[in-house]
Image: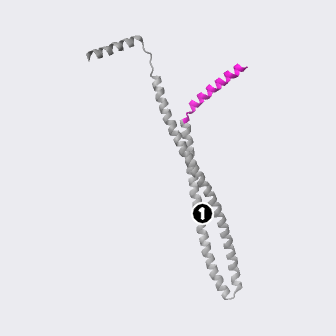
Amino acid sequence: MALINRVSRLFQADFNAVLDRIEEPELLLRHAVREMEDELDHDEQRSRLLNHEVKQLVLRRRNIEQALDSIEEELDICFEADNDELARPLVTRKLELLQAIRFLDGKRENLCQSLENLNTRISENRSRLESMRQKADLLAESDQHSSSETLIDATRFSIDKADVEVALLREKQKRSRS
């Protein structure tokens, strides 16, 4: 039974080695690099979108602040005229705008936090991508080196004694002329 297990493991190891050679690690690594580049592009696009949203929120907040300044002036006029009936809708509008500012500030804070997390992830992914590119380059170099070694091994020929004798005679002949 132990012999069967050993033979089985041997066949599995050989089969796995064959699969490893078939899969071509260089191609798999290049594919992984492409996927990482795509993910990085997607994250950078998302980062640009979040930045745009933050800018839009800041712009909305400025517009609301301008509206609040206008309401403040109108409230001053109402209170100088001692007209509470005109001041009530303005106070209501002022409260609504203040709530809108609080909402926008909260939303901006959440977007900024998401943007910070995304930028951290982008930075980490860039460093991982650079590492993967370096590994791919090293693998490509080692594959080129090993393929040239394979070519050298493949060029080994069997040499007959007669070939050696003929080559020896030629070498002697060359040297005797000089």
Residue 39 in percent (x, y) is at 58, 48
Residue picked out by circle 1:
54
Q: Residue at position x 63%, y 57% from top? A: 114
Name of the residue lying farthest toward the right: 1
Is residue 26 or residue 173 the one in the foreground?
Answer: 173
Q: Is residue 21 left or right of residue 161?
A: right
As drawn, which residue projects farthest toward the bottom? 81
Indicate whether residue 21 is drawn in magenta.
yes
Magenta stretch, main secondary structure, is helix
Which of the pair 158/31 is nearer the observer? 158
**Where 35 sits versus 45, above or below?**
above
The residue at 53%/40% (across/down) is 135
Identity of the residue drawn at 67% across and 67% down = 103
Instruction: Tell me residue 27's x, y (percent).
Output: 54, 37
Determine whether 154 is above or below 43 in the image: above
Where residue 59 appears, as percent x and y from the top left, is 58, 68
Residue 72 lies left or right of residue 171; in this view the side is right
Residue 77, relative to residue 155: is it above or below? below
Quadrant position of residue 83: bottom right
Quarter of the picture holding the C terminus: top left
Question: How busy is the neighbourhood of tag 1: few (under 14 within 10 Å), some, or many (20 plus)?
Answer: many
169 in magenta: no
Given residues 100 and 166, the one toward you in this image is: 166
* Residue name at image x 67 percent, y 76 percent: 94
Measured as percent of width and height from the top left, residue 85 is found at 71, 84
The magenta stretch is 1-25
At mark 1, the secondary structure is: helix
Q: Amino acid at mark 1?
A: Val
Which of the 4 image quarters holds residue 92?
Answer: bottom right
